[in-house]
Amino acid sequence: MTPIPKPRRLTFPREPPRVQAYANLYRFGKTAGAAPLLVYIGGATNRQTYLAQYGTEPTPIVNELARALELQPLPSLDALICPCPIDSGGEGHEYFVDHFDGELCTELGAPPAALACVGYSAGAGYATHLAIVAEARALAVFGSAGVHQAAADNRTLLERLRGAGARPTEIAIFRNDSDSVVAPPQTVATQLRPLHARAMAMRPGQHKFADYAANDTVRNAFRFVIERLSAE
C-alpha cells in the first residue's frame, strides 16, 4: 500500500459557543510546487462525536485513499480530509465553499493544480456544492444525501456552465443496494444532467461507511477522481 504521510492538523477557531472546525491535510509524493487537491467530506455526526474525533486521525478513510493511489499513482497529491460541518452558522452548503476559499486555501499556501471532491452521506451535498462552484475536475459521492439540494441551489450556474461549453465536472454516483437513506443513483445523475454525471452499478450493503468500504466503493470513488486528476 502507498505509504501514508503524517498529517498536518488544521484548526480553525470559532467564537463560543460555536464549535472549532478542523481538518487533516495529507501530502503524498513530491511537495515542491502546486499539487492536485482532493477534498473529502465525511458524513453527518453529532457534536459529541465531532469533538471526540478532534484528536484522532481519519485512518479508515486515508487507508482507502492510499489503496486507490496504489492502483493509480500520482507524482504528488494534497488530500484534505474534512469532517462534515456541524456548525455552519446557518449558511448551509455555502459554508464549506466560504471555508474552502478562505481558511483552507490559505493553509495550503498555493492554489491547487487541479481540484477533485469526494463526499459521503451528508458530506456529499457539501462536496457537490464545492465541486460545482469551484469547477472541480471530478466528483464522486456515495451514500449521497444532500446532492439534490446542492444541484437545485446551483441550477442557474449549472445551466450557464453548460451554455458556455465549459469543461464539465465528471461525476460518479455510488449507492449500495440496501441503502434506504438516499435516492437511486440514476435519479441523482438526472439532477446533475448539465455535468458529466454517471450512475455506477449498485453493490451489496447498507448506508454505513464500513459497508461502502467493505465492497470497495470508497476505494473506487477515490480512484475515479484520482484518474481524472492525472489527466491533462
Image (cartoon, grey):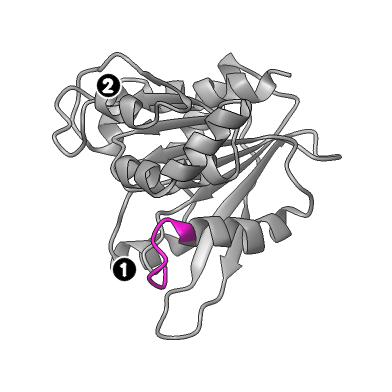
Label 1 SS = helix
Can residue 11 be seen here? The reply is yes
Q: Earlier in the sequence, mark 2 or mark 1?
A: 1
Percent position of residue 48, x then y: 30, 68
User: CA gap, disc 2 to disc 1?
Assistant: 33 Å
Q: Is residue 133 magenta?
A: no
Percent position of residue 19, x then y: 43, 74
Q: Amino acid at mark 2?
A: Gln
Residue drawn at (85%, 40%) of the image: 33
Residue drawn at (41%, 73%) of the image: 89
Q: Nearer the viewer, residue 198 or 71?
A: 198
For the magenta stretch, what is the residue range? 88-94
Q: In the drawing, does residue 135 fall left or right of residue 208?
A: right
Q: Nearer the viewer, residue 159 or 183?
A: 159
Identify residue for label 1. 47
- For the C terminus, give its image quadrant: top right
Q: Is residue 144 above or below residue 16?
A: above
State which quadrant residue 35 falls in. Answer: top right
- For the N terminus, give its image quadrant: top right
Q: Is residue 11 above or below residue 134?
A: below
Identify residue for label 2. 186
Q: Amino acid at mark 1?
A: Arg
State which quadrant residue 201 falls in. Answer: top left
Q: In the drawing, does residue 160 fall left or right of residue 184?
A: right
Q: Is residue 217 above or below residue 6?
A: above
Most common secondary structure along the magenta stretch: loop
Q: Is residue 211 above or below residue 18?
A: above
User: Residue 224 — which label?
Assistant: none
Label 2 SS = helix
Percent position of residue 129, x then y: 46, 46
Q: Are marks 2 and 1 in contact (CB under 8 Å)?
A: no
